[in-house]
Image (cartoon, rainbow, N blue to C red):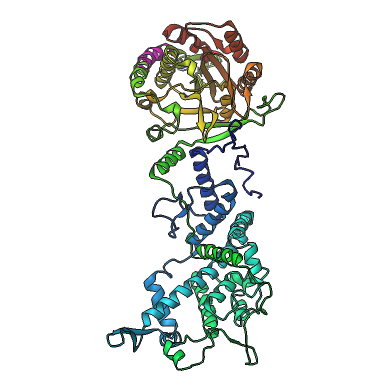
Amino acid sequence: MSHHSNFWYDFDQDDNVDILTGEEIKPGKDYVKMAATLRAISNFVRIVTGENIPVKYNNKDESFTDGKTVVISGNIKDKDFDPTVGLALHEGSHCLLTDFDIIKEHNFNNYIKNSFDIESICKKHNFYETTWCDEKSEMVSTGEYNKSQAVRYIADTLKQLLNFVEDRRIDYYIYKNAPGYQGYYEALYDKYFHSKVIDKALQSNEKTSEDLDSYMFRLINITNSNRDLKSLKGLMKIWKALDLKNIDRLKSTQDALDVATNVFEIIESHLPATISENQEQDGGDNRADETTTDNGTPSQSGSPSGVNELTDSQRKQLQKAIEKQKELLDGKIKKSNISKKDKNNIQAIQESGSETKTVGNGMPGRYYGAKSNGTDCLVVRTLSQSLIDSRVYETLNEREWRQETNQDAINDGLRLGTQLGRKLQVRNDERSLKYTRLNKGKIDKRLVSSLGYGYTSVFNQVFEERFNPAIVHISVDASGSMSGDKWKNAQRATVAIAKAASMVGNLDIVISYRSTEEIARKNVPAIFIAYDSRKDKINKIATLFKNITCPGITPEGLCFEAIQKEIVDGSGDMDSYFINFSDGAPYFENKDIQYWGQYAVRHTKNQVDNMVHRGIKVLSYFISGQYKYESNESDFKVMYGKGAEFINTSQVVPLAKTLNKMFSTK
């Protein structure tokens, strides 16, 4: 099945079979994909309707769209994505265009009472009040019309007819105003209407008796190319009343209701009267299975017996297909729900701006000699308490007994940052130079008396030199090898720089953490943007950063590639800096990619070179531990070039010295 969403939506074509056991691997819940799906469908609905109509996953007791909100299934398989989009657009258009007040029970019943001869309906269909007769031990008619029963009968039938006509009106709106989305609608109707058993039934003598069930089946499928307008006596009249080629003449739900009423009356005029038990016992005519030809002669409805007959199995399939059609027509398609926990997790991920990006294209693939088409990289743009509480991401799920140690490092960083802020004077320094005895500028009062002697150079100008506004992106390696003292040192230095920046004018800080996460049983690189001083207060670091841990491996350059567009370019009006903290060579692998060795080193270097080319100054601190490896330091120099630094980042003086050097370099 072709997907109309392939241009933006990543359909996973991976083999879900364990190569060792041969058993199917059941994927975990991909909350990121679920959030992306919800966001994408919401965008579709908003674009098509021009309204901000809420779209949400089905919760318990919220199976159906209420006219204000679009509800989608909590379990969307790839093959069902296009029909789901089509259904969401369909329901969203109803929210936009359908007058739901018309079909409210009170209003609808009043319309029926004012538009139909209720007594005639009662008489034709034997809708009479009954009472219990003790003598006969049975229910007997009182002779009074049961008007409530008649109204229910009309309402049930008329609503189905109205839904059909209104759907045609809504469909036209989509086809006219959003032609680019027609494919999703077609996928919807392919799923619910265009089936082989429906096609075969329309060509057979199934549903050809002059009864309501047959009329509804033939009407619902009247747009099918296999329709037979001669299969029922009133079907041609209905076709003309619908006038589908001019459906745009219907401008409102009331217009659709008027057409539905006309169709109801056509059907009613061809339905035989219901025969009561007494009439049958009295030998009254029973023509329920008999129809009349145009010249008035009785004849059996439908095709000759035996022509294109359905088998018993096909009849069962047909009944299921009809039920699916009625569910769509009535707006009651059953949708799998999600738990309250899943709903909260998806909401937290939506608020965090989580998404996946493809990185590492051209790196070595899973098999020897193969090139990778890249792998997903998770990008989380906002850290929040709700995201931490969801426990969806391991990187934001530090164990409680370690949080106190983390908090100590953060508190130390805030204190260190206060000292560092005083030493980052280079950003605050402003120099003013005054030039006098000029031919233009501001008159120097001290030289006014010189005008009498013919001097004209009595002007001065003041030139001020100050630093441009600047932004610093700090990226911290959150791999497992960074745990312990390395992690404390990196966190302490990172927090210190953020605190110092809050004391310096025109300097913003963004902090991100690079790690790996398991999403739907697949390991992927991940980068978390935890702090952005342009929107966050420094208190966020003090309260939330204790939850950040380092459980991953080292997808260094892959994460840099994923956030290249997140890092502000350096320009004449804005200074941009990138500061890195890491402890070794890049490494990552999954079933998509093999990222290690010189391939990974060169890829990371390319990402750093790209930043430099964009006017971003790079400074990278090597966080060393108890054991040093010359090869790691050598690779580090290759990747970060002149920006590589090997200092003790827990000491204020060398930290301030390297930062001031970076900030003052033109």
* Figure quadrant of the C terminus: top right
Identify the residue at image location x=55%, y=73%.
216
Q: Give the quadrant of residue 596.
A: top right
Q: Position of residue 654 (x, y in %)?
A: 46, 7
Whether residue 460 is visible to the viewer of this picture, yes or no, is: no
Q: Give the quadrant of residue 308.
A: bottom right
Q: State the residue in front, 202 or 98.
A: 202
Whether residue 519 is visible to the viewer of this picture, yes or no, is: yes
Number of labels in the image equals: 0
Identify the residue at image location x=54%, y=14%.
620
Q: State the residue in front, 376 or 43.
A: 376
Q: State the residue in front, 280 or 539.
A: 280
* Residue 417 shown in magenta: yes
Q: Position of residue 181 (x, y in %)?
A: 61, 54
Identify the residue at image location x=53%, y=53%.
45
Q: State the residue in front, 340 or 536.
A: 340
The magenta span reads 412-423
What secondary structure do most residues of the magenta stretch adopt? helix
Q: Position of residue 66 (x, y in %)?
A: 43, 59
Asked whether, in this view, residue 520 is left or right of residue 305, the answer is: left
* Residue 472 shown in magenta: no
Q: Position of residue 60 (x, y in %)?
A: 39, 52
Q: Give the quadrant of residue 525.
A: top right
